[in-house]
Image (cartoon, rainbow, N blue to C red):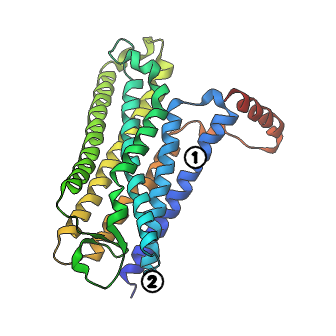
Amino acid sequence: MISSELIFGVAFFLQCAIGIVGNSLLLVLYVCIAFIKPQEKKPMDLILAHLTVANMATLFTRGIPEIMFCFGMRNVLNDLGCKVVLYIYRISRGFSVCTTSLLSMFQAIIISPNNSVWARIKVKAHKYILHCFLFFCVTNALIYIRVIEHSEAIKNDNISRYEYISHIFMVRSLNENESTAAFLFGMTLHDFIYHLLMALSSTHMVLLLYRHSKQVQHIYSNSNCSRSFPEIKATQTILLLVSCFVLFYWINNCCTLYVTYSVENKVEVETIGAFFGGCYPALSPLLLIGSDSRIGKLHFIPGKEKRLHKDFMNGLVNY
């Protein structure tokens, strides 16, 4: 009879393989577009490229340790390894929240009418993307710095000192002091703000799409109709991404809360939660690849090597 650990191990392996390959291909796609066909580059590509990096970091730091555990490789990481892995995982997960929220807000601004209050922001929005990423990195690194102090590798001695016990790492019970309260408040406020921004921007996009569907009979009389349909398709893709993110995020959180406050340590529940936590990083590149019409325009055939080399060199100069 096949054990549940083996089934989970295969599931995590497939999830990580699909996610890492998909995110890597998507990242290569954006690099190729930036250097080979810069005329097709979009400001949103930069946001999506950072999202793929965050996705790969999440899969490496959470999925691979789960695979190791499921296939019998226990207690491989020491205290330092657990601190580093958990810290990178928390930062990449937080960065994924921020980037998905930024993606939703950016698309909401892009599709807003030119006569709306967002008209001025629309022109300058792409200039502040890198500033946003720097802010995301600094805030997440500062918020989760206490993870390094309180996480340890699995040990058999005195587990009563630990509030959250995973089958990979343990988190010591937090003392009730001002610094702990500030940490919990900052972590909660961080996720709440970005989920609220996601909800508001998504609602704005849904209303714009609904308004567009009501006026679809006039679409062919609009001079900008050739640009409308790609923007609508991109908006629908981003709405689907946001919906998937929120769904998998809260399933993972519910499982984590259950394991944290449950009297008995449910390894299966934690493993299921970790699997759902990796679904968004694994599936999001597939949605993006399937919706990007530029993929079919990148042909690398021998007869065009000379022309592609020339385009590549021109792209380096223009970039």
Q: Is residue 269 left or right of residue 274?
A: left
Q: Is residue 235 above or below residue 51?
A: above
Residue 312: image quadrant is: top right
Across and down, in percent, residue 199 comes to 27, 37
Taking depth in this image into account, of 245 and 130 the one nearest to the observer is: 130
Residue 266: image quadrant is: bottom left
Q: Is residue 303 left or right of residue 83?
A: right
Q: Which mark is residue 98?
A: none
Which amino acid does the dot numbered 2 rest on?
Answer: Gly
**Disc 1 crowd, CA 10 A, few/some/many (<14, 14-19, 20+):** many
Instruction: Please identify the residue farthest to the bottom as the structure is shown.
Output: 1
Q: Tell me the residue at 44%/54% (across/down).
A: 281
Residue 110: image quadrant is: top left
Precedes in sequence: disc 2 or disc 1: 1
Question: Which of the image's four quarters has the C terminus?
Answer: top right
- The residue beneath circle 2 is 72
Taking depth in this image into account, of 318 and 6 the one nearest to the observer is: 318
Instruction: Please identify the residue farthest to the front as the structure is shown.
Output: 178
Q: Secondary structure at mark 2?
A: loop
Alpha carbon distance from label 2 to label 1: 33 Å
Proximity of marks 2 and 1: CB atoms separated by less than 8 Å: no
Q: Is residue 314 left or right of residue 90?
A: right
Across and down, in percent, residue 20 comes to 53, 58
Across and down, in percent, residue 246 comes to 30, 48
- The residue beneath circle 1 is 27
Which amino acid does the dot numbered 1 rest on?
Answer: Leu
Q: Is residue 180 above or below residue 319?
A: below
**Disc 2 crowd, CA 10 A, few/some/many (<14, 14-19, 20+):** few
Is residue 143 visible to the viewer in this orientation of the structure? yes
Q: Secondary structure at mark 1?
A: helix
Q: Tell me the residue at 22%/64% (across/down).
A: 174
